[in-house]
Image: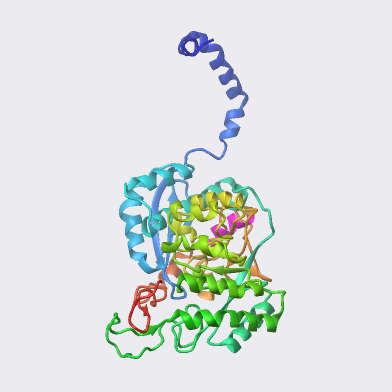
C-alpha cells in the first residue's frame, strides 16, 4: 500500500475496521485507565506573593487550579529586582496562562517563552520559573508522588550540602569550619576577610560596606568610592587560607571557595594553580560570565575543579562550557533560567560531559526553589553538592515543610509534589524591608581605590 492508498483507506469506510479496534479497546477500559488522573484541570488564578521572613526579599508564585484545594508553589525570586518580576507575572504571564491545562508543563514553558517575542533574561525567566515549578508541584500532587519520582526516582537518599563558613580572619574562619564539621557537614565553603577591603562572603565590618577614604553620606561614585576592593592582596590570601584550614582540619573535609569573579584573568589562573595542592572540592566563579572564554586558558593549566554559572541566563552562556568540559560543576540559579523544566535538561546534558550539578542556593533561593532543586538532585546521577545548610526560623514558619537538613544531608519531605507549603497570612506579616532594594547592596557600589566599579 502506498501513501495515497493509505490515505484513501483511512478516509473511507474501509477504515471502519481499524476504528472498530480502537473502540473495542476503549470499551475494554485501557485508554480510560491510561487517562486516569489526567482529566483536565485548568489554571484558575496565579498569585505573586512577596515576603521577606528573614529580610531577604522572596518572590513566590501560587498557581491555583479549577480543582478545589489543588495548587502549586514556584520560586520566582530575583531578589534585587523583585517588583519587576511581580509585574511580569501579574500583567503578562497571568492573563496569558489563565485557563491553560495544568498538565501541559512543557508547552506552557515553551509558549510563555515565545509570548514576549523578546525573551530570556532574569526578569522574564524568573516569572516563568514561578509558574513552571508550581506546575511540577501540581503534577506531583495529582500523581500522588513526590516530584523526584516524576523525574526518574531516587538515585541517592539525600543531597550532600555545603556550609558557608566565613570569618574576618583565619582564626574566626577556623572556628566556623569547626562548627560546621561538628554539625556533620562534610563540605565547607571557606571565605576570609582581607584587612581593609570589602571582601565578598567574609564576615565582619569589611563585608561589602567597608569604609573607604571618603566615608560620609555622599553618593558613591567613581570620584567617591566607599566599599573598596583590590584583588591582588586577596589573590595572595587565598592559598594561605587553604593552607591554614587544611593544616587545622586535615584531608577529611571537602573545601570550597567562591572567588566571585573579582579578579583578573592572570589572578584567576594563579589562584587555581596555587590551591591545586590543597585539593579543593571546587573553586567557584573565577571569572564573570562576560569572560567565559577565559576558562579555556585556565583549564589547560591546572586540575583544580571549577564551578561556574549562577549568573547564567541562556543556553548560549552555559552550553559551550559544558560541551567543551571546561567546568566541573554547573551552578545555575534554577529560577534564573526558567525553572525546573530547563534545569532538568541542563542536568541530563551535563551528565554526558562529566559535569556535575551544584545549583546556586543561598538565601535568595526560596525554600520552594531548594525543594525543586532537591527533587532534581535526588534523581540526577551527576549530582555534585547542594549549597545550603538549612533555613532560618521565620522562613521555616512561613514555609511549612521546608526540606530538612540532618548530618550534612538535605532530605525530601516524602509528600506528593514538592512537599512544601506557604502560610500566606504569616508571609504577609513579613513585608519587604524598607531601604535599598538589594539582597546585598554592595553590587554596583564596590569599587577599586581609584573609583573603578568592580564586577560584580
Ligand atoms: Mg557564588
Residue 214 placement, left or right of 351: left
**Residue visible at 53% across and 82% down in the picture:** 236
Q: Position of residue 329 (x, y in %)?
A: 57, 61
Asked whether 43 falls inside the magenta stretch, the response is no
The number of discs equals 0
Q: Which residues are magenta?
A: 369-378
Q: Is residue 70 above or below residue 187?
A: above
Task: Confirm whether residue 145 shows in the render.
Answer: no
Q: Quadrant of the C terminus?
A: bottom left
Quadrant position of the N terminus in the picture: top right
Most foreground residue, 366 or 195: 195
Main SS of the magenta part reads helix
Q: Please state which of residues 273 and 262 is positioned toward the viewer in this rendering.
A: 273
For the point 61% across and 74% down, the residue is: 275
The answer to whether residue 444 of the structure is visible from this angle is yes
The residue lying toward the viewer, choosing from 316 and 394, is 316
Q: Residue at x 39, y 51 (%)?
A: 45
Q: Quadrant of residue 48?
A: bottom left
Across and down, in percent, residue 79 comes to: 40, 68
Foreground of the two, 132 or 350: 350
Position above or below: 191 against 353: below
Amino acid at each position: 500500500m502506498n501513501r495515497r492508498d493509505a490515505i484513501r483507506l483511512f478516509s473511507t469506510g474501509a477504515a471502519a475496521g481499524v476504528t472498530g479496534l480502537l473502540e473495542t479497546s476503549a470499551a475494554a477500559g485501557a485508554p480510560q485507565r491510561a487517562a486516569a488522573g489526567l482529566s483536565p484541570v485548568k489554571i484558575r488564578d496565579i498569585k505573586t506573593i512577596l515576603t521577606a521572613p528573614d529580610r531577604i526579599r522572596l518572590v513566590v508564585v501560587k498557581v491555583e487550579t479549577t480543582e478545589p484545594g489543588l495548587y502549586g508553589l514556584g520560586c520566582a525570586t530575583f531578589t534585587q529586582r523583585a517588583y519587576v518580576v511581580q509585574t511580569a507575572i501579574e500583567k503578562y504571564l497571568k492573563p496569558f496562562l489563565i485557563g491553560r491545562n495544568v498538565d501541559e508543563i512543557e508547552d506552557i514553558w515553551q509558549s510563555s517563552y515565545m509570548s514576549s517575542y523578546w525573551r530570556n533574561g532574569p526578569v522574564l525567566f524568573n516569572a516563568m520559573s514561578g509558574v513552571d515549578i508550581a506546575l511540577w508541584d501540581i503534577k506531583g500532587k495529582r500523581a500522588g508522588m513526590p516530584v523526584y519520582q516524576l523525574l526518574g526516582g531516587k538515585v541517592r537518599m539525600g543531597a550532600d550540602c555545603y556550609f558557608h563558613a566565613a570569618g574576618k580572619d583565619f582564626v574566626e574562619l577556623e572556628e566556623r569550619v569547626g562548627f560546621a564539621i561538628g554539625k556533620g557537614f562534610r563540605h565547607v565553603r571557606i571565605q576570609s576577610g582581607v584587612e581593609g577591603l570589602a571582601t565578598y562572603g567574609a564576615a565582619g565590618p569589611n563585608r561589602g560596606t567597608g569604609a573607604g577614604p571618603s566615608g560620609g553620606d555622599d553618593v558613591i561614585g567613581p570620584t567617591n568610592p566607599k566599599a573598596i576592593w583590590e584583588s591582588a592582596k586577596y589573590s595572595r590570601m587565598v592559598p594561605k587560607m587553604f593552607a591554614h584550614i587544611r593544616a587545622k582540619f586535615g584531608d577529611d573535609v571537602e573545601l570550597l571557595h567562591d572567588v566571585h569573579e573579582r579578579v583578573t584573568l592572570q589572578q584567576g589562573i594563579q589562584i587555581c594553580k596555587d590551591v591545586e595542592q590543597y585539593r579543593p572540592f571546587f573553586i567557584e566563579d573565577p571569572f564573570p560570565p562576560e569572560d567565559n572564554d577565559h576558562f579555556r586558558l585556565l583549564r589547560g593549566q591546572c586540575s583544580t575543579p571549577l564551578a561556574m554559572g549562577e549568573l547564567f541566563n541562556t543556553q548560549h552562556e552555559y552550553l559551550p562550557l559544558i560541551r567543551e568540559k571546561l567546568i566541573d560543576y554547573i551552578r545555575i540559579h534554577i529560577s534564573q533560567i526558567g525553572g525546573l523544566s530547563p534545569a532538568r535538561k541542563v542536568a541530563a546534558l551535563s551528565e554526558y560531559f562529566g559535569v556535575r550539578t551544584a545549583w546556586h542556593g543561598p538565601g535568595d533561593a526560596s525554600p520552594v526553589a531548594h525543594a525543586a532543586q532537591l527533587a532534581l538532585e535526588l534523581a540526577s546521577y551527576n549530582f555534585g553538592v547542594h549549597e545550603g545548610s538549612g533555613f532560618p526560623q521565620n522562613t521555616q514558619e512561613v514555609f511549612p515543610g521546608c526540606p530538612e537538613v540532618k548530618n550534612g544531608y538535605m532530605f525530601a519531605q516524602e509528600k506528593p509534589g514538592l512537599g512544601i507549603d506557604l502560610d500566606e497570612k504569616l508571609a504577609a506579616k513579613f513585608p519587604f524591608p524598607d531601604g535599598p532594594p538589594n539582597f546585598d547592596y554592595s553590587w554596583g557600589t564596590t569599587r577599586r581605590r581609584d573609583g573603578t566599579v568592580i564586577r560584580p
